[in-house]
Image (cartoon, rainbow, N blue to C red):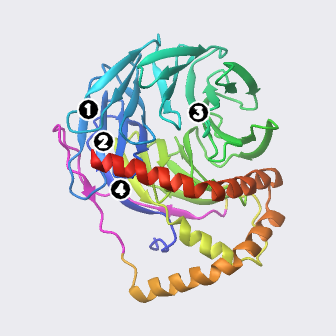
Amino acid sequence: MAAPCPEDPSLERHFKGHRDAITSVDFSLNTKQLASGSMDSCLMVWHMKPQSRAYRFAGHKDAVTCVNFSPSGHLLASGSRDKTVRIWIPNVKGESTVFRAHTATVRSVHFCSDGQSLVTASDDKTVKVWSTHRQKFLFSLSQHINWVRCARFSPDGRLIVSASDDKTVKLWDKTSRECVHSYCEHGGFVTYVDFHPSGTCIAAAGMDNTVKVWDVRMHRLLQHYQLHSAAVNALSFHPSGNYLLTASSDSTLKILDLMEGRLLYTLHGHQGPATTVAFSRTGEYFASGGSDEQVMVWKSNFDVVDYREVIKVHRPPAPLATSGNLPEVDFPVPPGGGRSQESVQSQLQEPISMPQTLTSTLEHIVGQLDVLTQAAQHRDQACLVHSGLSQCLVQARRAQALAQPSIRRHQRAAIQSQEGT
């Protein structure tokens, strides 16, 4: 098979140390750590620095189903089939505090953007909200009539979205604790749901092999994808809001271009179902996990894809892709078995270096492309397949542009604080 183009996503490294299927992955704020949960009842924190040792945290009495770093990266939450939630300090000691209130398997944990609250979802059919620092259960949301697989805060923390085996996605107001709307279009269990970075849209994955995107203001279905050949187990938005990453039991990862309403890539790497995916906070990397017990880290390379798209401003947009003529990139799994010691050595694949002349040329092109940005945005708005989502994303881009200076200041402060400790 031909080698991947420079702009294609590339498999950077893989981690092996879990003894059973991977259930969840999440990056810390500064992308220095990657957490993973597994059916082996352990939570691991991998260090992105080459040749660094991983932490293995034991404490849960059964499978770890979900993990999530706090916005600052100082805390790490996990949920388990043992019905508990744990909050860990992700260092060598691995100290944790146990939260108990659920009466069945905890499927999902997610910190609010301010780090003050945690939302959890469970097979007891409830969504629960907790105070992180007071280590206290606050309230339950209880309108689902089957297991709740996933619950997430909106970026501003005012809404909560949940996905359930009752085939619904529910939108909740955190303050009033009322269900604002129920989305009932899925034909099977809804496995995962998350907010677009703008907070104006949600995407949900289902056992019916589909991904659906809704506008949460008008409660309108914006996009519908049926590109996987088996259940879609997880999804993750790129921080730009322009791309969506999915993981499926058909063993593939897929990258969707939401602005064009089409499939960009199908990635092969896992042997067996791909169970979880997550972008890093910057979008430079994404991680995936599977039933093959492996955690993989990929380089996104979407910046080069964006430059290519701007260069092709005069080309007509592609229609919504089907599973036919799609770009597929096949990555064989690197050799190397797992080790069962408490400290696990990470493995690194040699990255592909870019010639200095090409780097200089690209930098010059990027400078010239700034002039074309406004024209490209007009072309995007005029030619998108799904005008409803286009409007949402364009508005989100403007809001994000205005908010970026403040966000960067807060992120720098958080990273400096983390490195100081």
**Residue behind mark 4:** 333
Residue shown at the point (40%, 80%) measured from the top left: 354
**Pointer 3 residue:** 153
Label 1 vs 4, first from the N-terminus: 1
The CA distance from mark 1 to mark 2 is 8 Å
Query: Which range is magenta?
Result: 325-352
Residue 212 seen by the camera: no
Q: Nearer the viewer, mark 3 or mark 1?
A: 3
The residue identified by callout 1 is 57
Picture quarter with the C terminus: top left
CB atoms of marks 4 and 2 within 8 Å: no
Q: Residue type at mark 4: give it.
A: Val
First in sequence, mark 4 or 2: give its number.
2
Farthest residue, direction bottom: 357
Within the magenta stretch, is there residue 328?
A: yes
- From the top left corner, tell me how far across and down residue 58 is, in percent: 25, 27
Residue holding disc 2 = 45
